[in-house]
Structures are given as C-alpha cells and as structure tokens.
Image: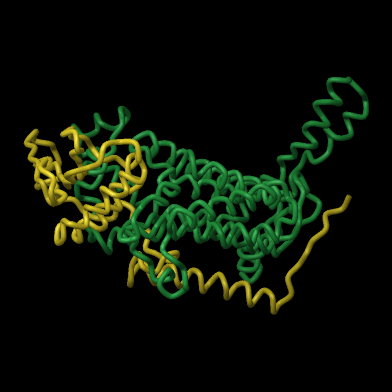
Chain colours: A yellow, B green
C-alpha cells in the first residue's frame, strides 16, 4: 500500500505555529517572571537554589509524640503530606505553630487506628560544610513545635 | 530554509505512533497513582487548611480537595485511561482523561510544592485528544497534524531541560554551578551510588557544570530532526542521563520520560503483527514471509522533511 499523507492547509499551519509560539512564550515568560502560582506554566526550578560551599546544609523532618509517649518521624507515608510541601509552607508553621494541628489531623485521618498525636515538631538537621566538604559538625534545631492543649507530652 | 522550518513543525508522522503513545499515556496514568506518586491519593486525608490553591484553582471554581473529590478524580482518570490505551473512542475519552488528569495535577501541586516533571506529559494528553483514531503499527497513513502535535510535546520536553537552567540562574544566580547544590541534594536523598561522591566536592562541581552545559544544549535535539539517527541517539542519551540521576538521587521524572517517547519511531512496534509472525513461524507456514518482509526500510530515516 502506498503511503497516504494528511496535510495541513496554510491557514491551519499559521494557527498551529501560533499555538506553539504562545505555549513557548508562556512557559518562557514564567521562567523569568512570576512563579509556581502560574502552574501549569511554572518555572522549572527543581534544585535551582544555590547552596553555599561554606555554611549549613539543612534537612527537614517532622517528629511527633503520641498519647503513649512514643516519639516517631512523621513520614510522607504516615500523613500524605510531603516533606517538600511542609518546607513550602514552613514559614507559615514557624509563624503560627498551631497550624501543625492540621498535620496531626492528617496523620490521624490516615491512621485512624493508631494512638492520637500530642506533640508535633519541625526539626531541621544542619550539616556544616566547609569548601563543599562535610566537616562532621551537625546541629539540630526545633523550628516549630505544637502541643495540643490539655496534653502533657 | 522555508522547507526546513516547515519540516520542523509539520514533518508527517505515522499514525501508528499515535496508537503507541495513547497506550503509554494511559499506562502511565494507571501506574502513577500507586507506584510513582502515592501521596497524591493520600491528599484525600489532608485538612483543607493545608490546601494552598494555585492561581488557576482560585480563578476557576475548583473546590478544595476532600476525600470524595480526590477519590472521584482518580476513578475518572482510570476509567478514561483504559479506553484511551486501547484506542476505543480515543478522542472522547482523551478529553475526559485530560480534564480529570488536570484536576489530579491540581490536587498534586496545591499543598505548598509544585513539581515540574509533568509539563510535557500534560501537553501529550492534550494533543492526543486532537489526533485521529489510530492502530498499532500503521506506517501507511502519515499526518502533518500528528507531526505538529508531537512536535509541541517535544518542545515541551526540551523546555523542561532548557528553561530549568534559566530557573537555576534566576533562583540560584549565575554561580549555581559553583555552589554546593549537589552536595545538599545527596545529603537529602543520596543512595549507595552517590553517597561516596560527598568526599569529592570538585567532582560534584564538575557535574554541576556538566548539567548546565547539557541542559543548554538540549534544544539541538529538535533542530537535528532531519537526521533521525542523530536524534534517536540524543534521546537515548537523555534516557541514560535519567537512569544516572535516578541511581544517584532516586528522582525519576517518570511522566517526562513517557512524554519523551514521542521522539521515537514507535510506529514500528506492531504487537498484532508480531503475534501473527510468531504464530506463523511456529506453524512454519510459507505465508509468514509476506509479513516478515514488509517494512524493512523506514521511510522516515531517509526523509528530510
């Protein structure tokens, strides 16, 4: 069988090339102005921040204490709330630690059979870098903490 | 020159590739929710107060996700993905899939972190809605419309690399490549394949420069379109790059990898024809030869647009 071609007329070509150029323009524009809010035309900023070669490299986690006094890490699996999402909203939590109540709720909705949470903490582990090398110096900072009223953890 | 520009946007692509890409797109939707991004479905348990709607979620009357919205969106995605995969009413179900998947992406990205691996894939779902019905292995029918659609996906895929370097310059400064960003990344999510690199920061700096160079050069893959072998080799290199990134940081960019498959001559894959050949071979019949001989040379390899 011979190859059969479906062609596009000149007007159709003009329209299609315009669509391509508009998509390209939008995604390019938000790379330089605006931000994630313009999703799906958001800047592709995966790992785009710079890290000082001399300074602290931080790694955030969330820990919880439950009604039985057990301390454990609140992972993505346990809450459905990702570390990156927590970091994205971290300034909110630091400003108003009571919002961590909602992270506790997320955990309890996900795990209705487990003991309730009493305390939630955002902890950052900071690794000291010098000239890009880890010096072995590590500190941990509790950046935000929330304990439910009436509970003593 | 005009010929080159015309070919850039409108090189005819065989319809067999549409069938293959529909299968892959549907397949990814079926895999993603449990194997790749299981937290999206878990967002059904998040209290509304953690929801941070994006611009589009504030403009359009899209309610804050809750248990039923999240579960329902996934159900519609899966119910539409299956007919799309197998080419049953692919345009109708394609539109349903595109709209439901877009809502799925809003549920994904509206909690304080926006991921950027899905741009090409969303463009793919959109252009697949507009392409004609197709069957696997069809290399007889070629369409400029289809060529344009896949070209748009390819541009989106390349933007994901190329523009990400400009984001690095914007957010990290022109010094990004000299910074400790890979060290930080490996501390956060290193593996046995990458942890040892922490002892060699110069190596990581070199890798950062390599990354910038690589990403800035990616548009070449679009411009070499008349030379298919070169283009396929570059795409193969992209896939290898992602395997390496996955080994080092367990970041896979899976939807992007599915979208990128539209660079490849998937119209050569013909499961039914393959089955026929295998069956015929087993019987040892002579008529098997007719199928086997078909399509030895690929017109696209010699076409220059």
User: Is residue B301 among what the camera can see?
Assistant: no
The one of B37 and B186 positioned closer to us in this rendering: B37
Q: Nearer the viewer, residue B217 or B83?
A: B83
* Residue B285 place in picture, x, y as percent: 92, 23
The residue that appears at 28% across and 35% down in the rendered structure is B190
Say which residue appears at 78% left-offset and 64% top-offset.
A6
Quadrant occupied by the C terminus of chain B = bottom right
Q: How many marks overall?
A: 0
> Is A149 displayed left or right of B5 in the figure?
left
Tell me residue B279's x, y (percent). 83, 26
Quarter of the rendering occupied by the N terminus of chain B: bottom right
Rendered view: A120 above or below B6: above
- Residue A109: x percent and y percent? 35, 46
**Do we see residue B69 in this rendering?**
yes
Q: Is residue B267 above or below residue A6?
A: above
- The quadrant where residue A97 appears: bottom left
In the figure, is residue B98 to the left or right of A75?
Answer: right
Task: Farthest residue to the front: give it.
Answer: A150
**In this rendering, position of residue A70 left or right of residue B104:** left
Residue positioned 39% across, 61% down in the render: B163
Q: Position of residue A8 (x, y in %)?
A: 73, 70
Q: Which quadrant holds residue A19?
A: bottom right
Looking at the image, the residue that sits furthest to the bottom is: A11
Observer-nearest of A67 and B139: A67
């Amino acid at each position: 069988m011979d190859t059969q071609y479906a062609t596009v007329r000149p007007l159709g070509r003009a329209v299609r090339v315009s669509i391509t150029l508009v998509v390209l323009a939008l995604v390019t524009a938000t790379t330089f102005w605006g931000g994630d809010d313009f999703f799906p035309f958001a800047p592709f900023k995966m790992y785009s921040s710079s890290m000082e070669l001399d300074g602290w490299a931080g790694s955030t986690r969330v820990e919880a204490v439950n009604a039985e006094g057990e301390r454990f890490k609140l992972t993505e699996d346990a809450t459905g709330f990702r570390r990156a999402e927590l970091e994205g909203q971290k300034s909110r939590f630091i400003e108003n630690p009571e919002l961590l109540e909602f992270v506790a709720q997320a955990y309890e909705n996900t795990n209705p059979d487990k003991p309730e949470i009493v305390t939630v903490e955002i902890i950052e582990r900071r690794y000291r870098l010098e000239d890009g090398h880890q010096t072995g110096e590590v500190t941990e900072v509790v950046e935000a903490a929330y304990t439910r009223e009436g509970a003593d953890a | 020159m005009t010929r080159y520009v015309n070919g850039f946007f409108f090189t005819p692509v065989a319809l067999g590739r549409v069938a293959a890409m529909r299968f892959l797109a549907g397949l990814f939707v079926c895999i993603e929710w449990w194997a790749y991004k299981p937290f999206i479905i878990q967002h059904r348990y998040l209290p509304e107060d953690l929801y941070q709607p994006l611009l589009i979620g504030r403009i359009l009357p899209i309610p804050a996700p809750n248990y039923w919205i999240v579960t329902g969106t996934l159900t519609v995605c899966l119910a539409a993905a299956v007919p799309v995969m197998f080419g049953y009413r692919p345009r109708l179900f394609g539109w349903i899939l595109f709209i439901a998947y877009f809502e799925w992406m809003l549920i994904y990205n509206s909690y304080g972190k926006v991921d950027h691996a899905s741009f090409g894939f969303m463009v793919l779902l959109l252009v697949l809605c507009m392409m004609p019905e197709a069957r696997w292995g069809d290399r007889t029918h070629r369409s400029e419309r289809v060529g344009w659609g896949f070209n748009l996906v390819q541009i989106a895929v390349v933007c994901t690399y190329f523009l990400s370097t400009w984001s690095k310059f914007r957010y990290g400064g022109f010094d990004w490549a000299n910074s400790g960003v890979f060290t930080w990344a490996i501390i956060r999510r290193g593996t046995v394949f990458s942890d040892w690199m922490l002892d060699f920061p110069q190596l990581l700096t070199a890798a950062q420069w390599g990354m910038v160079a690589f990403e800035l050069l990616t548009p070449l893959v679009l411009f070499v379109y008349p030379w298919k072998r070169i283009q396929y080799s570059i795409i193969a290199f992209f896939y290898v790059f992602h395997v390496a990134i996955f080994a080092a940081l367990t970041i896979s960019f899976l939807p992007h990898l599915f979208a990128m498959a539209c660079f490849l001559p998937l119209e050569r894959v013909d499961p039914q024809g393959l089955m026929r050949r295998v069956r015929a071979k087993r019987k040892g019949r002579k008529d098997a030869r007719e199928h086997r001989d078909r399509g030895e040379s690929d017109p696209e390899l010699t076409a220059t647009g």
